[in-house]
Image: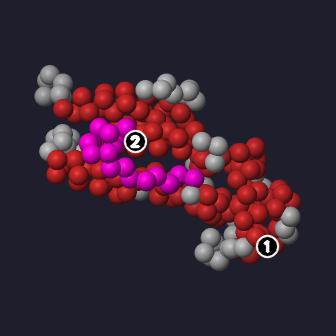
Amino acid sequence: MAGIGTASGPRAAAIFDAARELLAERGHDGLTIEAVARAAGVNKTTIYRWWPSKPALVRATVLHARALDISVPDTGSLRGDLVALVEQVTGLLTGPHAEPVVRALAGASGQPELAELTRELFAGGFAREQPVFERARARGELPATDPQLLVDLVAGAVRVRVLLRRQPLPDRFAADVVDAVLHSARYPGEGE
């Protein structure tokens, strides 16, 4: 299958730009190869030569945009690193370049190719975040809780608020979420 590795140059860039803009305007369901071709000023056969389906084009657009990339912070503390991660995730999910990507992934649950991409982008994040926990363990800061659970809890809070409830986030949201999760991890409930 052709894809992002074989598509380059001005035509590919125009196609990616058009696909991203149309995702923002219409969402995944409203995006068509024909509309992308028109907006990019190319023939739809050019698109099909590189990507055989709409999910393949959306996947390539998401990967090309790198809209959901994060960098692993090193603030010197577990709390600081987690707050920085939550702030990055929040910025990604609410930023202008990421919104169409997030909407496309959220609206395409019935597409196996996009479901796999969603797993790669969101579930694969823990491998990237592992250094945060290795450093915290070396400093003696890591609670006796599974680090993946900590990531799931803080990231889950962001996703619920931003994607499901579609509510604005208060200024201290990242710090409040991290503080609540770390406090719970250090001081488990009574009946344990």
Q: Where is residue 47 in the image (x, y as percent from the top left)?
A: 76, 69
Residue at left offset 76%, top offset 57%: 18
Q: In this view, does 144 lie above or below 19?
A: above
Say whether residue 73 is magenta. Answer: yes
> Where, quadrant-wise, is the N terminus in this rendering?
bottom right
Count residues near mark 1 (Cα–Cα under 10 Å), then give few for <14, some for 14-19, many for 20+: some
Q: In this view, does 102 lie above or below 64?
A: above
30 and 185: which one is in front? 185
- Look at the image and give the residue range highlighted in magenta: 67-84
Residue at left offset 34%, top offset 33%: 178
57 relative position to 106: left or right: right
- The residue where tag 1 is placed is 46
Q: In this view, does 111 lie above or below 188?
A: below
Classify mark 1: helix, strand or loop.
helix
Name the amino acid, label 1. Thr
- The residue where tag 2 is placed is 84
Quadrant assignment, res 51? bottom right
Residue at left offset 49%, top offset 24%: 170
